[in-house]
Amino acid sequence: MSVPEAERLARVGLSLLTEPGDARVAAVVADVGAQVLYDNVLAQRDDSEVRRDARSRLEGCDPVRQLEQATRAGLRFVVPGDTEWPTQLDDLALAPPLQQRGGAPLGLWVRGPLRLDGLGSSVAVVGSRSATTYGADVAAQVAAVVARSGAPVVSGAAFGIDQAAHRGALGGGGTTIAVLACGADRVYPQAHRELIEHLAREGAVVSESPPGGAPTRVRFLSRNRIIAALTSGTVVVEAAVRSGALNTANWATRLNRHLMGVPGPITSAPSQGVHQLLRSGAATLVTSGQEVLEMVAPAGQHVLEEPRGRERSRDRLSMSDQQVLDAVPVSRAVGADSVARTAGMALLKVGPALDRLRAGGYVEREEDGWRLAALAQE
Amino acid sequence: MSVPEAERLARVGLSLLTEPGDARVAAVVADVGAQVLYDNVLAQRDDSEVRRDARSRLEGCDPVRQLEQATRAGLRFVVPGDTEWPTQLDDLALAPPLQQRGGAPLGLWVRGPLRLDGLGSSVAVVGSRSATTYGADVAAQVAAVVARSGAPVVSGAAFGIDQAAHRGALGGGGTTIAVLACGADRVYPQAHRELIEHLAREGAVVSESPPGGAPTRVRFLSRNRIIAALTSGTVVVEAAVRSGALNTANWATRLNRHLMGVPGPITSAPSQGVHQLLRSGAATLVTSGQEVLEMVAPAGQHVLEEPRGRERSRDRLSMSDQQVLDAVPVSRAVGADSVARTAGMALLKVGPALDRLRAGGYVEREEDGWRLAALAQE
């Protein structure tokens, strides 16, 4: 199956004329198709709010030239029907809009060798731009474990948690995808030029906005739904109560994706939003990349051992042997009858218990009775 | 209703002869009554494991003298039927044993002016002895808020979280109860002499073990069930994966009490056990004393406002006005048609939007067009 050129060019045109993630545009495209809407905009036919808005950008709109320029700049425009189209994005057509953003994107502008089909159990790791060192370390660790398992890590290339997630994934030897609010040919923030260029060489830099598009605030909201939709699950590492990461979290929930949150100190403002997600039951608490994989991977693929702590040797004793051991003094030896009395246990049970404890090296028998062995005094 | 002297003395006797929290003893007492069991032990009648064990301590057992000595030392022995008896402890008779500990206590030895009836929505604040400064600070804060509301804070007087909880409750001007594994006349750990004496003067120091009883390891397990049973809810602040606080948590669950956990950094071992409780769904995540009160207080008494974060003025704008605002440049003025094109919005909508934004102080109109006002540049 290949996408007709007219369909692709109509989608390029609409990508130039409309705002990314405009839920009204997505609804019309889902209803009549991209070509009909694009033709209607060009023909200045009838009148509708969507078309009126689109016409404000008509001057100089040239999809053929745009596509050529993009190709020369190393970008491709992946649309529904392409074999590379990540079909999980189609779920967006079924989710209700949020802040008037929603619907499947017209297409994705992609830079980089990583193909968007077959992302498998990819994981979004998102969070606050003003992350703490704790949050950044944790994001990097989680991303490294996910990436090492073969699942791509998706994030937004922003300061803080995003940056740490990409860095962690690269450190884990895995692939990672940046979804930008500006055009995929641009670099935002400027300080992340090296990171974003690296991702474009090794993984993928993706945007719903056309090349050259500016990173406006509203586009971050649209972008967040792409991050949530591309992935099997979203991990929120740190997010203050008004963080944009909570918008991504909201999309993950709308899309029936796994939503996970990493807790932090309750005294830390950047953890407050995550704690709200956990308290409301929207997100599942995770404390490691392994726990993330356990949630997003196909059943049975990542089975976790709960951390159990070092077992102390006396924990292996029966409760009544522990009771006898508790009754044997450290500093001086006493008779079995005294042990029995202290333990509150019949002498005929205490004798065999003391023998067992001696065999285990817990107590020692001296001339004048029983005392604790060195081992048991730790 | 007053408790017959023979009943009280039988319970004192059994308290001296048996181990606190021995589930077998509690089962027999629930079945035949304390007096029958005590008489049978004294009479060396028949034979049973419970009676054989109890007889190991018969020598010198004198309940009348014990009670007199205790009274002189400022202790009282509160038993079922006393008006001071905290009837919530009766729930223990219905819960299954854990590590052979269980059942309602024979009575509680109490030192201090606080009466144990009418503890209302008291809260246990428990956790690791090797607490971090984070954990200790949080325990003290939570306890202070709970205590200030009038609810007693119950803990175990141990190092770490326990100590911080008592200290926080006292700092909050509230009452606090220590439940000890040793006799209520003893001080353990020694370093907490001042704290425990203070609690005995202002609140209550409570134990199931008779006066003089040693703090053996098994008695800590028995003690934990009393802490959970006395209170409406247990808050675990920090607990490593093998912490005794998880034993208290287990009892809270067995007793259908509210179980709450305070999260911490996932990199902190003392938070690992709490995170397990939260992940398993056994405990509810709480981040403040107010959230604790909301859980344990009668419905509607403590209604919380979710923390909402500072609302930025531009968050109050409609989505399309935000889109127009995003399209107005900072550094130079541009015409409304340019704004419309950048926003991807029809000019006839952009004009009124710019007027609204000017009225709100977000944009300024200059001779050659529109530019961002200082306010909007934050």
Image (cartoon, coloured by chain):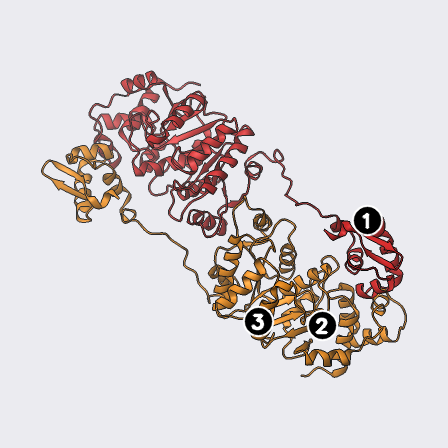
Chain colours: A red, B orange
Q: Are marks 3 and 2 in contact (CB under 8 Å)?
A: no
A217 left or right, relative to A44: right
Q: What residue do we see at 89% from left, 57% from top?
A: A367
User: Which quadrant does the N terminus of chain A fall into?
Assistant: top left
Which of these two is toward me, A145 or B80? A145
Protein chain holding label 1: A
* Secondary structure of residue under mark 2: loop
- Mark 3 surroundings: few (<14), some (14-19) or many (≥20) residues within 10 A: some
Amino acid at pointer 3? His
* Residue A96 x %, y %: 39, 41
Instruction: Same chain for labels 3 and 2? Say yes or no.
Output: yes
Is tag 3's residue or tag 2's residue first in the polypeptide sequence?
A: 3
* Secondary structure of residue under mark 1: loop
Circle on res. B198: 3
Q: Which residue is mark 2?
A: B211
B133 left or right, relative to B214: left
Amino acid at pointer 2? Pro
Can residue B298 be spotted in the picture?
no
- Whether residue A314 is situated above or below residue B351 in the rendered picture: below
Give the foreground label among 3 and 2: 3
Q: Which residue is mark 1?
A: A361
Q: What residue do we see at 85% from left, 55% from top?
A: A354
In the picture, residue B4 is in which quadrant? bottom right
